[in-house]
Image (spheres, helix red, strand yellow):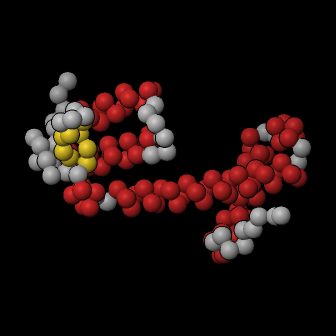
Amino acid sequence: MKINITKEEYRLLLDILYLGDWMLTAHDEEKVAEKEKYQDVIQKFYSYAEEMGCGDLIEADKESNKYYETVVYEDTSEVDGVIEDYNSAAFWEELVSRLAMRDAEETEENDVINRMSPKERLQLLCSLEEKYHEEFMANDLTNLKIKE
């Protein structure tokens, strides 16, 4: 199979690959063997950077025989903003979701929650989540305190 893409599309593909790699590995403290297949594909596409006019964005490291993003890529790419937006949205959604589940478990027995229909559970959690969404929209984390 041959894939024909323009240089502009290749440049966008670099961002997608970077974001995918970041999602896969940003929180890993060491290499994870199960993820190597993804990194191999990223390396394959990075290897075409020079040919696609993006040699200033991706460079080969002869010692490790791998390709890496350059400082020019990091300085000109918009992926940092995408990552920041994603992190912020994920943080708030996860915080709200966990607080709502905690509140649900405090007010209802676990087996009661488990016996609820998906629709009932969703209604309960949505009403609790809405309370937190409103609070955090109005006050950010100002009123969030740890009980001693």
Quadrant of residue 62 within the rendered picture: top left
Q: Position of residue 99 (x, y in %)?
A: 73, 56
Rendering coords of residue 65 (x, y %): 22, 33
Image point 40% across, 46% down: which residue? 22
State whether residue 128 is above or below residue 141.
above
State how many labels appear. 0
On screen, residue 109 versus residue 31, left or right, reads right
Say above or below: 54 vs 66.
Answer: below
In this rendered view, identify the residue nearer to me: 37 or 123: 37
Task: Say which residue appears at 63% left-offset and 53% top-offset.
Answer: 94
From where the camera sits, is residue 7 visible? no
* 27 relative position to 127: left or right: left
Using the rendered view, name the quadrant where residue 96 is placed. bottom right
Q: Is residue 148 left or right of residue 95?
A: right
- Percent across and percent down for residue 91 are 58, 57
Tell me if I can see residue 69 in this picture.
yes
Task: Identify whether 66 is placed above or below 22.
Answer: above
Residue 44 occupies quadrant: top left
Left or right: 16, with 44 as reference point:
right
Quadrant containing the C terminus is bottom right
Q: Quadrant of the N terminus?
A: top left
Residue drawn at 50 percent across, 56 percent down: 87
Residue farthest to the top? Answer: 1
Residue 40 placement (x, y as % from top left)? 31, 30
Tell me which residue sits at (68%, 74%) in the image.
142
Residue placed furthest toward the front: 63
